[in-house]
Amino acid sequence: MSTRLKSEGLTDLENPSGKRGAVPVTVAFGDGIGPEIMKASLKVLVQAGADIAIEPIDIGERLYLSGNTSGIGPEAWDSLRRTRVFYKAPITTPQGGGYKSLNVTVRKTLGLFANVRPCVAYPPFIATKHPGMDVVIIRENEEDLYAGIEHRQTDEVYQCLKLISRPGCEKIVRYAFEYARAHGRRKVTCFTKDNIMKLTDGLFHRVFDEIAADYPDIESEHWIVDIGAAKLADTPQAFDVIVMPNLYGDVLSDVAAQIAGSVGLAPSANIGQQCAMFEAIHGSAPRRAGQDVANPSGLLLAGVMMLAHIGQPEVARRVHNAWLKTIEDGIHTYDVFKEGLSKQKVGTAAFAEAVIERLDQTPKTLRSVAHGAASKPFAVPQARPTKPAKKELVGIDVFVHATKPVEELARDMQAAANELFALTMITNRGVKVWPDGLPETFCTDHWRCRYLARPGKQFNKAMIVELLKNLTYTGVDFIKTEHLYNFDGEPGFSLGQGQ
């Protein structure tokens, strides 16, 4: 018997059905309110007939503080790779530097590229300004700024690399359309900022348009993320399924959950080719820990998504409808309790018991659900091999740490050129400041200096070696370089503002 289940008073849940074919599920009780809401959620799932075999693991704050900077150890990885299903309560990342995000680590290590977050309003029982809201946000989970590649480059400037790949775009966009088709959704919307980030977000948008053509039965549209976010906050009924790169999806899925009613009600599924993770979207709320007040709804509904994923849609239906009936009956935890709307304020354990009491009941006002009845299984998409392009080196950007005036810097940089290549441009924070810069432009100590082959010459890597040697002799503090390539004749680099 697991010592963790024993310590939580759940000795009857290690393999509740007693069947040899029970689906193994790795379970993390988490930190803060995590143990309370996980205990409550597991009791509901098991009482509803979930055929699972629970494998508890220890992750999170205790491991962080013991010196494990990732918050997860080898035994936990072994369990996850064996069960391939992870039911996770919120964890606490200690304050201070050096601790990696456990969620990001698990998602990227196990290839959980698709984050699926249903955001549903439950009027009139949960207060909301958007009674008709029923939006699913599908967020890319592995790349974008969440690659976590950051550098301090000068006294004044720090850098975070935004990495967007064609395979990553293809997988998440196709997943969004497959999800929409499987669940009877009518439209998929893409949010990007490709009017500014023309290469990275531009790739996401371009792949979206390409893949949308494969789904003529589903409406598709694209919004610039800022106005799209405003529209989502004001008129969420205009959207159905929204697919986004990682950062936008992270921010806007929380916004969508809150305007639907409460972040505390929102579940999340993280799906990959081999594994899946199910969790609430909220944090560990350590100030509420041990008080039996936390709302287990987000984690419980994540459990519903898990049951549907492992092929137990009937149990998922029982739990989901019982939860809806509990909400409809006005039995609410403190976070969603409203005088005049709610009838009884209950704690974590009592809320779970109320759901258990309503198993096999269906709501009268809220729409009941039938997991599996309207949806169709679909294979998790894979990216197609990328056709290699003709790649041609045409120049180099040299990034420099300097505090001198730009005209003086330009003289130093020109001195490193020769008859084969020339300095063509200097920018500061992406704005061209040489030649023909404006004195009003504010500059930091971080400069991008672009060299291109002179007319009639072909740039090559030997030129780069020569250039950097010359800069070293000149005393220039170069801190980074980026090679400039054309791909099938098209520039694979931004030209810089002000050109």
Image (cartoon, rainbow, N blue to C red):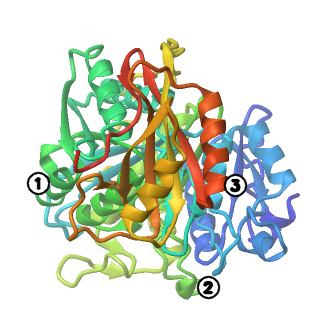
Residue 310, position as x, y percentages in the image: 59, 34
User: In 3D space, how far apart are the residues under numbered discs 1 and 3 (Cα atoms)?
Assistant: 37 Å
The residue that label 1 is drawn on is 235
Amino acid type shown at disc 2:
Gly
User: Which residue lies at the image location 76% right of the left edge and 47% below the top edge?
Assistant: 15
Q: Which type of secondary structure does the marked residue at label 3 adopt? A: strand
Mark 3: give few (<14), some (14-19) or many (20+) Cα within 10 Å: many
350 lies above or below 253 = below
Amino acid type shown at disc 1:
Thr
Give the mark nearest the N terminus, 1 or 3. Answer: 3
User: Which residue lies at the image location 43% right of the left edge and 31% below the top edge?
Assistant: 169
440 lies above or below 301 = below
Residue 86, position as x, y percentages in the image: 65, 48
124 lies above or below 191 = below
Query: Observer-nearest residue: 216 or 463?
Result: 463
User: Which residue lies at the image location 56% right of the left edge and 69% below the top edge?
Assistant: 37
One can see residue 42 in this view: no
The residue that label 3 is drawn on is 27
User: In 3D space, how far apart are the residues under numbered discs 1 and 2 (Cα atoms)?
Assistant: 38 Å
User: In 3D space, how far apart are the residues under numbered discs 3 and 2 (Cα atoms)?
Assistant: 19 Å
Amino acid type shown at disc 3:
Val
Q: Which type of secondary structure does the marked residue at label 2 adopt? A: loop
Mark 1: give few (<14), some (14-19) or many (20+) Cα within 10 Å: some
The residue that label 2 is drawn on is 290
Query: Observer-nearest residue: 465 or 240?
Result: 465
Residue 454, position as x, y percentages in the image: 42, 28
Give the mark nearest the N terminus, 1 or 2. Answer: 1
User: Which residue lies at the image location 74% right of the left edge and 39% below the top edge?
Assistant: 83
